[in-house]
Image (cartoon, rainbow, N blue to C red):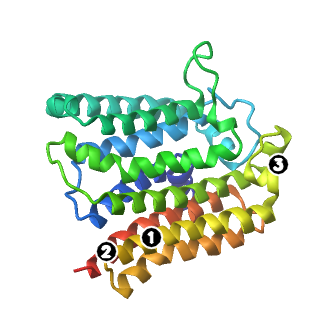
Amino acid sequence: MLRRAIELIFFGNYFVGLLAVALSAELSTQLRLPYNSPLYYLLIFCAPVMYYTYAYTGILHSDSPANLRSEWYRDHTWLTRITQPVLLAICILCSVAMLLLYGRNILHLPFVYWLIIGVIGMAAVLYYGLLPRSLIQINLRNTGWLKAFVIGFVWGSFVSLLPIIALHVEGRPVVVNPVVVTALFIKNWMFCTVNAIMFDMKDYEDDSNKQLQTFAVTFGIQRTITYILIPLSVIGMVAMLGMTTYRHFGWLAISINAIPFLLLLLVSWSMHRERNILYYLVVIDGIVLVKALCGIFAMQFVP
């Protein structure tokens, strides 16, 4: 029973929805902003669950190699056929409700906010190649090195910039320090990029057969860990240290914020051994949740 629940949460991508909410709440806490509305959190929970599940519905990857996750989806086809329309309906209802409640505010968003929304949306669409091939033939899942950075960029923008824009939409405009927001964005971008590269490592053999030049395929597992994962983790930590020092955090708050980056370095080094899919989902994605919780908890020690 416990294993079935774990598989549902992680294979079904519900944990990804939780991460979106947790990271957004972390940003609001760290910037001392009001939390977004429940409507917004419901939307950003359902949207990533539906988005990540799309690749496993048989629409795109019917020829995927056998693994625990693909087998789970094959055994639970009936579930995705029910949940995907339900999630889509919830996303549409939330969007319509926000449009009705905050339509005037949406129309008066600054141009830079529309630009950010457009970039996030376009990257998300191009990641799966959802636009008609006659219009544009780009699928960012097949771009090798760029793939992980695009995923990290979308997540960094999604949880570092979108909550601020959503507050403006909800009629609660806030003034934020651009230096701090930039540091938080870089921190989240690098953290999520490392996470994405780790996930690419589980597909090393399949990507190699497809001649998809991911970091793992190009450099090999060992060099990817040494020359890619660890340096990117350090860049994320430096951004965190810069932000916390700039805001005059005490040593305790800085130490708590450093915990997930130290865990990221530890898990990066552990990738020298081959791991199963649940390890990637539970441990690697679990570090992202630890990061959000540490970020929220550390603010309790900031005057």
Label 3 or label 2, whichever comes before in sequence order: 3
Helix, strand or loop at disc 3? helix
The residue beneath circle 1 is 240
Identity, as a three-letter code, of the amino acid under mark 2: Arg
In the figure, residue 202 lies in which quadrant?
bottom right
What's the distance in space between the residues labelled 2 and 1, CA to CA?
11 Å
Inspect the image, locate mark 1, and give the three-letter code of the amino acid beneath it: Met
- The single residue placed furthest to the bottom in the displayed view is 251
Circle number at residue 117: none
Give the vertical position of 34 relative to 143 (above or below): below
Q: Secondary structure at mark 1?
A: helix
Q: Position of residue 67 (x, y in %)?
A: 73, 47
Q: Are marks 3 and 1 in contact (CB under 8 Å)?
A: no
Q: Amino acid at mark 3?
A: Glu
Q: Position of residue 19 (x, y in %)?
A: 43, 55
Image position, residue 175 (x, y; %): 20, 55
Looking at the picture, tell me which residue is in the foreground, 170 or 20: 170
Front tag of 3 and 1? 1
Q: Looking at the image, can residue 1 be seen?
A: no
Name the residue beneath numbered marker 2. 247
> From the viewer's perspective, is residue 37 above or below residue 179?
above
In the rendered view, does 177 fall on the left or right side of 80?
left
User: Residue tagged by mark 3?
Assistant: 205
